[in-house]
Image: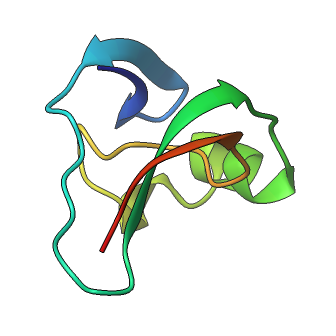
Amino acid sequence: MKALTFHGKRDVRVDTVPDPTIQEPTDIVIRVTSTGLCGSDLHLYEVLGPFIDEGDILGHEPMGIVEAVG
């Protein structure tokens, strides 16, 4: 799948990453149909970069269709 990934301060890229899988009984997997950015995403882009690793997937406000449940 494609995902927005962190590669350093002011360096984010759309990369191919492994498809998500169910790992816990409370997990769900969704097919994202739309998403947005918020202030927390922008803090990672600039100020809080040292607290995440290269290749980490960004974004936390997706909407979509449930594909699998735990």
Residue nearest the observer in this picture, 45 or 16: 16
Residue 64, image x, y percentages: 67, 38
Residue nearest the observer in this picture, 32 or 53: 32
Residue 59, image x, y percentages: 60, 45
What residue is drawn where x is 22% and y is 83%? 24
Residue nearest the observer in this picture, 57 or 63: 63
What residue is drawn where x is 29% and y is 20%? 1
- The coloring applied to the image is rainbow
Horizontal arrangement in the rendering, residue 39 relative to residue 52 (left or right): right
Name the image quarter holding the C terminus. bottom left
What residue is drawn where x is 56% and y is 61%? 48
The quadrant where residue 57 appears: top left
Q: Is residue 7 above or below residue 1?
A: below
Residue nearest the observer in this picture, 34 or 70: 70
Residue 52, image x, y percentages: 35, 60
Horizontal arrangement in the rendering, residue 44 relative to residue 25 (left or right): right
